[in-house]
Image: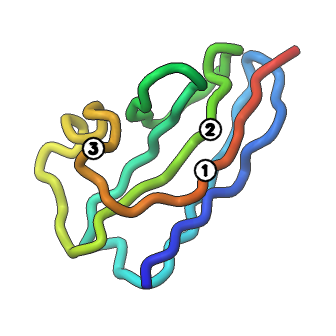
Amino acid sequence: QVQMVETGGGLVQPGSSLRLSCTVSGLNIAEHAMGWFRQVPGKEREGVSCMNGLKPEDTATYYCATLREPRRYTNIGYYCQRGGTDFDTWGQGTLVTVSS
């Protein structure tokens, strides 16, 4: 059984950095596409990548996701920007709040 657990969320000040981690068990991540996504309440989920200099508008629940079956996407950036519809296994999410 595949399990994904996100950690590292919390309250940070604008302009600071935060490191989120995704612990995956039950599969070989080298064989699976993976992504980070976020969702702001009331808005659609969107793909994210590495970020520095967090802003208040970055406040959201952050999720890591993968595919249950071994598959890697050739153009991973394209699939990341599709909001997660191409991923079928998700962690529970970790809340990041950016506020001074």
* Residue nearest the viewer, comparing 2 with 55: 2
The answer to which of 29 and 53 lies nearer the viewer is: 29
- Which secondary structure lies at badge 1? loop
Give the structural element (helix, strand or loop) at label 3: loop
Question: How far separated are the C-alphas under marks 1 and 2?
Answer: 6 Å
Instruction: Tell me which amino acid carries mark 3.
Output: Thr
Q: Which amino acid lies under the numbered mark 2 shown in the image of this protein?
A: Thr
Neighbour tally class for label 3: few under 14, some 14-19, many 20 plus, Cα within 10 Å: few
Image coordinates for residue 28, horizontal then vertical, percent? 35, 80
**Which label is found at residue 61?**
2
For the residue marked with disc 1, what is the amino acid? Answer: Gly
Which residue lies at the image location 39% right of the left edge and 63% below the top edge? 89
Q: Quadrant of residue 83?
A: top left
Q: Of the numbered discs in the image, which one, if any, rests on residue 85?
A: 3
User: Do the residues bearing badges 1 and 3 touch, measured as CB atoms within 8 Å?
Assistant: no
Mark toward the start of the polypeptide (1 vs 2) = 2
Q: Residues within 10 Å of mark 2 (few under 14, many from 20)?
A: some
Spot occupied by residue 68 in the image (x, y as percentages of width and height): 30, 72
Q: CA distance from mark 1 to mark 3?
A: 16 Å
Tell me the distance, in whole angstroms, between the alpha carbons under discs 3 and 2: 17 Å
Q: Are marks 1 and 2 in contact (CB under 8 Å)?
A: yes
Report helix, strand or loop for mark 2. Answer: strand
Label whose residue precedes the other's in the sequence (3 or 2) = 2
50 left or right of 31 in image: right
Q: Residue furthest left?
A: 74
In the rendered view of the protein, which quadrant contains the C terminus? top right
The x, y position of residue 58, in whole percent, is 62, 22
| Residue annotated with mark 1 | 93
